[in-house]
């Protein structure tokens, strides 16, 4: 570990299976919590806590607006962290337990008054989003530090998203089991679900830190040896990040595809129950169909990407997603047998939305290093995780507003589900297809113009290598 040559070779070479598994485990907890939140939080706030849909959507949007401040701050501070464990690991280790506790507190119903509920859930959302950033942003910023190989990064991200999608599936299975066990008490359902998923989300973060410990510290040793310039002020770093053309394309691709997914996930419970008139248990079954397909397709898209490039793989996957998404919108309530096959088709495309943008980002970071002389993973990954949260917040807020404007009637706590007006069910159907389809088409246009190919990335690495050798000589 003290040998700089060995450290550099460690970062350049392939990761072991043990390291890839440990790194992948780091996304299990954030995936479990994020998936439960996007599929159930709006539904919980409206139909269990009894909160007005517009107020519920506003809470989720405001929480993610806070991330516009929180994420870049954590990104910059983690870039500048000086600790014997390196820049990223202390954040993951020390933030894990507060992350689990604040997530759990979102599933308690403390009162019945609308404004008391609004204040409580807003405060918890702000704190919980902060600790999500504290553990997840430094974790994601480790990707370009652990390896600089173009295809190895796609492989590493395939492990990450295998755990991510696996966690999403696990969370939905747990939700279905817990809902069945406590079906007579909706409030207890969500308390138990929150507690179980909080514990399962916290523990894998320690596995991740332990499993990649040596590799992460070796990467930090190497970085310190080659990074000589002074750190830039925050505003200057933000300006440079947003002047990076390739980064803007990646952000646009990710924002559009992930917002399409978040919108679909948020509307899905209402689509299944209120439009297709299926039981509530069918919500988790349809979501599991999407997630299992996405998980199984990760290895396929990894191979496709190595053959035809990241852009080509993204085009194929998103095109399939469009077919499934529009198909869901066109279904009528009597066509329930087609819900699950179309959910599988959607899963083909969702897999590329997980894998490809995050595999593009490390290449962008190296282009930035070539242009500025500094590695600033934290600032770039902060905006990607911010984009992820904005997508979730905007998607949930938009669904809440659409439901409210269409006259959706929220369920009073302890009462049966009310019959919805035709305008509300039609709005649910249209929101399932039109908005996500438009976003996916925009993401395809952006992907077409994304400038970094495998050949350009190889050229960037050669220039960086030459610069580092020159720095050693001087």
Image (cartoon, helix red, strand yellow):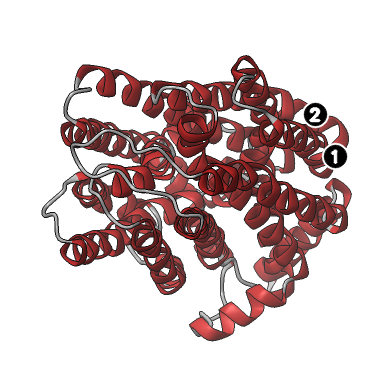
Q: Where is the C terminus found, in terms of image quarters?
A: bottom right
- Please identify the residue farthest to the top as the structure is shown: 337
Marks 1,2: beta carbons within 8 A: yes
Q: Which mark is residue 219?
A: none
**What residue did someone put label 1 on?**
312
Asked where in the image residue 204 lies, by quadrant, the reply is top left
> Is label 1 in a helix, a strand or a loop?
helix
Label 2 Cα crowd, 10 Å radius (few <14 / some 14-19 / many 20+): some
Label 1 Cα crowd, 10 Å radius (few <14 / some 14-19 / many 20+): some
- x, y (%) of residue 56? 35, 58
- Please tell me which residue is depicted at 70% across the width and 25% down the height of the picture: 345
Q: CA distance from mark 1 to mark 2?
A: 8 Å
Front residue (pair 412, 30): 412
Q: Earlier in the sequence, mark 1 or mark 2?
A: 2
**What residue did someone put label 2 on?**
304
Asked where in the image residue 335 lies, by quadrant, the reply is top right
- x, y (%) of residue 287? 51, 28
- Please tell me which residue is depicted at 54% across the width and 42% down the height of the picture: 425
- Let me know if residue 469 appears in the view: no
Front residue (pair 379, 118): 118
- x, y (%) of residue 383? 55, 65
């Amino acid at each position: 570990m003290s040998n700089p040559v060995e450290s550099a070779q460690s970062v350049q070479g392939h990761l072991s299976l043990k390291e890839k598994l440990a790194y992948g485990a780091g996304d299990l907890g954030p995936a479990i919590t994020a998936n439960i939140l996007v599929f159930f939080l709006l539904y919980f706030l409206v139909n269990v806590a009894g909160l007005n849909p517009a107020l519920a959507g506003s809470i989720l949007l405001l929480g993610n607006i806070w991330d516009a401040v929180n994420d870049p701050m954590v990104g910059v501070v983690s870039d500048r962290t000086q600790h014997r464990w390196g820049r990223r690991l202390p954040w993951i280790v020390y933030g894990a337990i507060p992350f689990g506790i604040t997530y759990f507190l979102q599933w308690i119903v403390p009162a019945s008054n609308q404004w008391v509920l609004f204040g409580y859930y807003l405060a918890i959302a702000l704190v919980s989003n902060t600790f999500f950033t504290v553990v997840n942003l430094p974790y994601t910023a480790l990707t370009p530090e652990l390896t600089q190989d173009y295809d190895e990064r796609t492989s590493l991200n395939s492990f990450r998203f295998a755990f991510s999608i696996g966690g999403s599936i696990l969370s939905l299975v747990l939700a279905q089991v817990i809902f069945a066990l406590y079906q007579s008490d909706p409030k207890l359902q969500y308390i138990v679900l929150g507690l179980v998923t909080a514990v399962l989300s916290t523990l894998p973060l320690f596995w991740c830190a332990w499993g990649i410990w040596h590799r992460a510290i070796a990467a930090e040793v190497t970085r310190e040896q080659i990074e000589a310039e002074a750190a830039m002020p925050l505003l200057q770093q933000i300006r440079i990040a947003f002047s990076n053309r390739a980064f803007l394309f990646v952000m646009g691709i990710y924002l559009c595809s992930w917002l399409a997914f978040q919108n679909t996930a948020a509307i899905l419970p209402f689509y299944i129950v209120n439009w297709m008139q299926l039981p509530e248990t069918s919500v988790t079954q349809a979501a599991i169909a999407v997630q299992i397909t996405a998980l199984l397709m990760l290895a396929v898209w990894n191979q496709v990407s190595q053959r035809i490039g990241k852009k080509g793989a993204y085009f194929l996957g998103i095109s399939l997603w469009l077919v499934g998404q529009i198909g869901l919108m066109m279904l009528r309530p009597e066509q329930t047998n087609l819900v699950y096959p179309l959910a599988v088709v959607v899963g083909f495309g969702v897999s590329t939305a997980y894998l490809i943008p995050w595999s593009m980002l490390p290449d962008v970071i190296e282009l930035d290093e070539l242009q500025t002389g500094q590695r600033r993973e934290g600032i770039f990954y902060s905006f990607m995780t911010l984009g992820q949260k904005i997508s979730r917040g905007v998607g949930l807020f938009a669904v809440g507003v659409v439901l409210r404007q269409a006259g959706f009637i929220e369920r009073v706590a302890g009462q049966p589900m009310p019959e919805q007006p035709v305008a509300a069910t039609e709005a649910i159907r249209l929101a399932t297809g039109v908005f996500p389809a438009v976003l996916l088409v925009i993401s395809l246009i952006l992907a077409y113009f994304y400038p970094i190919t495998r050949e350009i990335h190889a050229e960037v690495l050669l220039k960086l290598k030459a610069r580092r050798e020159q720095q050693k000589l001087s």
